[in-house]
Amino acid sequence: MSAKDFITGIKELCAPDSVHICDGSEGEFQALAKLLEEKGTWQPLKKRPGSFYARSDPSDVARVEASTYICSAKESDAGPTNNWKDPIEMIAVLEPLFRNCMKGRTMYVIPYAMGPKDSPYTKFGIEITDSAYVVCSMKIMARIVKIEEGKDFVCGIHSVGMPLEKGQEDVPWPCNKVKYIVHFPESREIWSYGSGYGGNALLGKKCFALRIGSKIAKDEGWLAEHMLILGLTSPEGEKKYIAAAFPSSCGKTNLAMLQPSLKGWKVECVGDDIAWMHFGKDGRLYAVNPENGFFGVAPGTSMDSNPNAMKSIEKNTIFTNVALTQDGDVWWEGMTKVPPEELTDWKGKSWKRGSAEKAAHPNSRFTVSKKQCPIYDPAGEKPEGVPIDAILFGGRRASLTPLVLESFNWSEGVLLGASISSEITAASEGAQGALRHDPFAMLPFCGYNMGDYFQHWLDLEQPGRSMPKIFAVNWFRKNSQGKYIWPGYGENTRVLKWIFNRLENREDGSKTPIGIVPKNLDVTELNISKEDMDSLFVIDSTKYNQECLELKSYFSETFGERFPKKFVQILLNWQSHF
Ligand code: O2Y
Ligand code: MN
């Protein structure tokens, strides 16, 4: 379909009052910012130049997994981890919802690119939306480009689902209690209805770059992953790149922007959430960050936990659902040790220090260009991407998994990725502390059968390719008093240093049945006892035996025949050593 036909068709379906083709210019952003201010969607922030403060409808605050669908022709191609509906049946549901849904509104057409300029890996999309907030956010999160006829693009249709009758007044944050986030991976289409928030509405991010992206990647032989990308430079000036997958609430943005505690080491950030990775002609794996900005969780971000994020958001930032200070600045839990005495909370109500309620929503966000990050790596703009030497898989586990472990080989490392599980935190649904499987941190984002996705990872290892080394990490191990043993944040440099040196065969390790753990991790000037250090690397045979059994039943019950046989062999082998 041509871009012109797509736009004409959606205009006919949605019946907007007017159509605006976005050019991504600063003038356009400013005009829309003014409009959003007049509508009461957001307000400029006195303390942060070029920044805005928005409050969403209290019912529209996060991704809606229960309303997220993968509509492939065959149910088995969506797999057991996705909601599935037949594409024709789903269109029959969506068509009436979208018919006339933009009445009284402007239909914005956003042509955008995901990936660096002039990169062979960059892909294009057109998002049609009736939300000016989405246009402004997309200007930060993607690269708005000109429509070029003849170029392939992913079609994205987004509506807040609140048409306006003649004379009907708009609300600051229009949305609908009926929500659908629908992906058609075979026709490369996204239809999103009813939400104006984050991953539901900024279609370039989770919908395109991960759900549709993972299916394209499978078809074309590459990887679209929920991973940060960082560059690590040693005191000797050698540089290596690391990609890392962690489930939500495991500090991905903090690691991507880490300020090293060890003298002479430097971290540079290529991306904090998504990596598209392809094998180059030299057989190495190269990564690009398809995004242009960060949509970071605000709570917990501070000058202690992530000074580079704090510096990134001093200007030109959209804040959504954080709290507002009396002097016109933003605040969230964890930003300062002592909260301000009085705030306006994310719902617009007066809030006093000591209140039982949170002032900022746990999923409140900052939206900012990656170019504002003081440690943004200029190599992030390289069309060919950056060469990945190591892949890290992590989760939040109070016990069992060691601080760091190097996998013996690619296949076993891939199984470590498939085995990620993480404790549920207050920010997510479900019983706090309970473990949830989240293979490759892709559970909500894999656009096809996850059993096939595991096999795709295994099949990447081919003669002539030099595979990155794979490591498992866990910053969250606790002692018998329930306290975190490892200090984390900047001190994670010590783990990165060990990984860096292992890549060069410069560091010794001790063999365990599932991989290699450090013999000597650099803990100079760190206040941690030998006993605590040792406990970070304990591999408890009984517990691991149970873990292998649990993994076997999870994998076989969930994925059945599509669970790779190779994984069964590895699990049996691991078990035989425990
Ligand atoms: O709640 C949302 O809509 C956003 S979710 C999100 C945003 C940025 C990066 N990662 C995520 C995620 O859920 O993994
Ligand atoms: Mn994410």
Image (cartoon, helix red, strand yellow):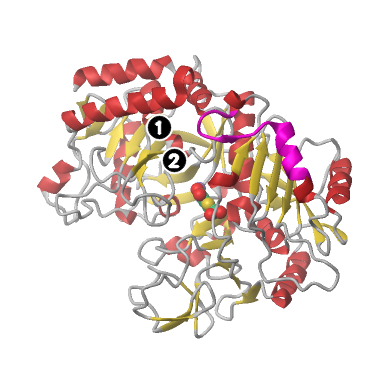
In the image, is the residue at mark 2 within 8 Å of ligand 2 by its beta carbon?
Answer: no
Question: Magenta span covers which residues?
Answer: 78-95
Please give the residue where the numbered disc 1 appears in the rendered image: 417
| Along the viewing direction, whichever of 180 and 511 lies nearer the viewer | 180
What's the mark number on residue 81?
none
Tag 2 near tag 1, CB within 8 Å: yes
Secondary-structure class at tag 1:
helix
Indicate whether 376 appears above or below 511. Answer: below
The reply to whether residue 117 is visible in this rendering is no
**Upstream in sequence: badge 2 or badge 1:** 2
Q: Would you say residue 123 sits in the magenta stretch?
A: no
Q: How many marks?
A: 2
Q: Is residue 200 left or right of residue 234?
A: right
Please give the residue where the numbered disc 2 appears in the rendered image: 245
Residue 270, percent from left and from top: 52, 47
Quadrant in the picture for the C terminus: top left
Residue 477, percent from left and from top: 24, 46
Residue at x 20%, y 32% (from the top left corner) = 543
Residue 194, percent from left and from top: 67, 55
